[in-house]
């Protein structure tokens, strides 16, 4: 089994990768920091990955996308089985309320670069006629909230894109999976005060792994977020805009 | 990333005494990208908070939460060598290595301790008489000093001798390399033998230490004579034809809230201990079990420390040399029985003579007795001080990893070599325990 993980040094991605490593998968890891990438690769080798390739990769630099996908196609002998896009940033709400450049930058990384890379990977998987493409969106993408609508809009764009891609690729044997995590206790959320809603990255990783292997369409992790977000989506806008969520 | 333990945010110790609050917590994620360690306030690594007293606390200082340092650097499945970051727990190590026919060389009574904690406290287990302490099996370790230096230490280095059992005070342990022991299955053969009194314990234990790799005794601390049950274990050998080791899925109970203070009162303890003693009707009983319930019976009850109520629990583990170990143990048990404080779990073991590798290692040849008490205020502390006094008279020592009460005088008596250790301290590191026992 060949698995590509982009953003492989994130806490959630590492947890997913450990599951695949325990299954003896061959892993291709892409991330920005070579030292962190090396530490993660060593860990996954020791945990049972049959092979680990690493690529220094910056998703914000679109020029690197084609080369990465080409390299993955070459390294994944027998075909790419799973691809997971797990990178992203959580922009500081106090900055992105007024800083238009920061908004554009956050949107470029969290949405534009993701859908661009998904397009290239979709082409590869479509040529193969099999495989799955999983993207980490967010519950924040289900409704625009005053506290994080820049991040939410980007994740919402990714989820909408994934839904369309899923429908397009379904007849061709390619699965597109949208993962919507709620609050997860990771470095990305390190600055937020923690409460009982925060999930452990190891648990979230295990659930994402399961969603990928079982070829789910949309997976909320942890699962309680599905009814919660259904309820939040059902609130009429007239009322919602007065709620402080 | 063990799901059950990464969520600890109270940064307390397992005994939940003394109360303590760090000024700040740094959650470490990458061994290559550490925050500066010399920021003014004293720093201390915090693993999973399984030390009972204040050895893992740094009241008013900075705690370096090592839960994010849980990566394996290398696992040689043929040679049985593991190198992993210091925040990986022993349970995570077992989950990784047991399916390949390896086991920890030494393990304490919980698998929710980190490798770093196991080194920093030079922990011991039921096989001490054969294997010595955990530190004996560490072949190398990585240490970050507050100067920015990154050191690789080996058993011959003076700083290695200070870091093993060094209570995290010589710097930040980044990774640990250890030798594992081979096992043919995940099962353990267990024999339990009832004994009437301390003399019978000594006779049985000496014999058991010669034939069994794992030996420990539970003792009824409600009564002075020292009756109890001796437990022997051995990994099931290859000739038993068992399936290869698998993954253990334990059903876990949980203590959801602090028990009322009256729960573990002397009467209930007497009842529990009497039942436990009488549970075993036959003088000797043999069973075969998975390693988890054998080594980690209490891990099956999550947050069992809450049974002791809001004020927490105080542990006391001492070792007294063999010379008059029997008399000293008798005196300790008599003092506990007479106090009426009652210990829920009292454990007796004969340590072996394998030398401990750390300057401040606790295990040494002799009898070790571990007791726990619900914290009832001053009277409990006074009892522990009296026990400390008996241990000092016998020329023994008390285990810092379990201690919250020893005086500076007792510490100096238990660890007269401490000035040699102190030369290796990292000036940026300190702990509540260290400040308490050195008055610093």
Image: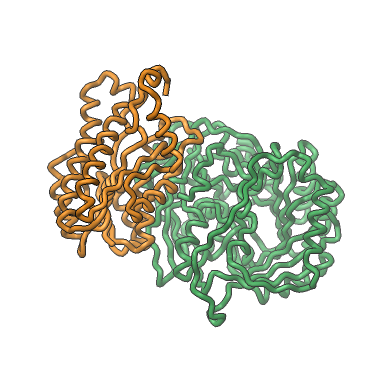
Report the front residue among A175 and B436: A175
x, y (%) of residue A163? 26, 41
Q: Is residue B33 visible?
A: yes
Q: Residue at x 31, y 31 (%)?
A: A152
In the image, residue A164 above or below residue B291: above
Question: According to the rendering, which colour does chain B have?
Answer: green
Residue under the point 27% across and 55% down: A82
Q: Residue at x 80, y 55 (%)?
A: B221
Q: What shade does chain A have?
A: orange
Residue, x 70% and y 53% (percent of image)?
B317
Colour scheme: by chain
Q: Position of residue A217 (x, y in %)?
A: 32, 47
Q: Is residue A192 left or right of residue B295?
A: left
In which quarter of the view is residue A222 placed? top left
For the C terminus of chain B, the image quarter is: top right
Q: Nearer the viewer, residue A129 or B6?
A: A129
């Amino acid at each position: 089994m060949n698995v590509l993980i982009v953003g492989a040094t994130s806490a959630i991605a590492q947890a997913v990768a450990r599951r695949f490593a325990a299954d003896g998968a061959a892993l291709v890891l892409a991330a920005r920091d070579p030292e962190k990438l090396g530490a993660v690769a060593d860990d996954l080798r020791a945990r049972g990955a049959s092979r680990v390739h690493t690529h220094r990769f910056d998703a914000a630099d679109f020029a690197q996308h084609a080369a990465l996908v080409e390299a993955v196609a070459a390294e994944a002998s027998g075909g790419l089985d799973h691809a997971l896009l797990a990178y992203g940033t959580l922009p500081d709400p106090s900055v992105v309320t007024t800083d238009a450049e920061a908004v554009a930058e956050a949107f470029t990384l969290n949405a534009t670069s993701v859908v661009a890379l998904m397009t290239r990977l979709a082409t590869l998987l479509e040529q193969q006629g099999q495989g799955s493409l999983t993207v980490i969106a967010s519950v924040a993408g289900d409704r625009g909230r005053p506290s994080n609508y820049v991040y939410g809009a980007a994740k919402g764009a990714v989820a909408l894109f994934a839904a369309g891609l899923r429908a397009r690729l379904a007849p061709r044997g390619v699965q597109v999976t949208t993962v919507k995590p709620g609050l997860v206790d990771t470095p990305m959320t390190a600055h937020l005060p923690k409460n009982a809603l925060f999930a452990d990255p190891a648990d979230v990783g295990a659930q994402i792994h399961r969603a990928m292997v079982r070829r789910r369409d949309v997976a909320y992790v942890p699962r309680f977020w599905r009814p919660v977000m259904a309820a939040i989506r059902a609130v009429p806008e007239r009322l919602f805009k007065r709620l402080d969520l | 990333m063990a799901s059950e333990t990464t969520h600890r945010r109270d940064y307390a110790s397992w005994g939940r005494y003394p109360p303590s609050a760090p000024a700040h917590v740094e959650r470490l994620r990458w061994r290559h990208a550490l925050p500066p360690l010399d920021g003014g306030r004293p720093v201390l690594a915090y693993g999973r908070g399984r030390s009972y007293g204040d050895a893992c606390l740094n009241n008013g200082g900075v705690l370096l939460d090592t839960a994010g340092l849980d990566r394996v650097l290398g696992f040689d499945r043929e040679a049985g060598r593991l190198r992993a970051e210091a925040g990986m727990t022993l349970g995570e190590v077992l989950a990784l290595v047991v399916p390949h026919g390896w086991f920890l060389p030494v393990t304490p009574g919980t698998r929710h301790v980190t490798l770093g904690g196991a080194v920093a406290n030079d922990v011991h287990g039921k096989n001490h008489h054969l294997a010595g302490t955990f530190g004996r099996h560490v072949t190398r370790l990585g240490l970050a000093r507050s100067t920015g230096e990154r050191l690789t230490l080996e058993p011959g280095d003076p700083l290695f001798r200070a870091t093993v059992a060094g209570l995290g005070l010589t710097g930040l342990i980044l990774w640990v390399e250890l030798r594992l022991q081979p096992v043919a299955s995940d099962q353990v053969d267990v024999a339990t033998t009832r004994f009437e009194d301390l003399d019978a314990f000594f006779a049985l234990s000496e014999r058991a230490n010669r034939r069994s790799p794992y030996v420990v005794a539970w003792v009824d601390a409600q009564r002075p004579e020292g009756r109890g049950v001796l437990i022997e274990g051995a990994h099931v050998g290859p000739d038993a034809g068992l399936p290869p080791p698998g993954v253990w899925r334990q059903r876990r109970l949980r203590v959801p809230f602090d028990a009322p203070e009256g729960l573990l009162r002397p009467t209930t303890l007497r009842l529990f201990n009497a039942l436990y003693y009488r549970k075993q009707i036959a003088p000797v009983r043999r069973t075969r079990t998975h390693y988890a319930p054998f080594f980690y019976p209490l891990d099956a009850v999550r947050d069992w420390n809450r049974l002791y109520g809001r004020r927490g629990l105080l542990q006391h583990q001492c070792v007294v040399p063999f010379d008059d170990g029997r008399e000293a143990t008798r005196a300790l048990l008599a003092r506990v029985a007479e106090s009426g404080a009652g210990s829920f779990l009292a454990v007796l073991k004969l340590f072996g003579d394998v030398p401990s590798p750390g300057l401040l290692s606790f295990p040494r040849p002799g009898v070790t007795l571990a007791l726990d008490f619900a914290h009832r205020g001053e009277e409990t502390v006074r009892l522990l001080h009296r026990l400390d006094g008996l241990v000092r008279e016998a020329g023994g020592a008390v285990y810092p990893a379990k201690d919250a009460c020893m005086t500076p005088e007792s510490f100096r008596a238990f660890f007269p070599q401490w000035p040699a250790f102190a030369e290796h301290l990292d000036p940026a590191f300190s702990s509540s325990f260290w400040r308490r026992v050195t008055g610093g």
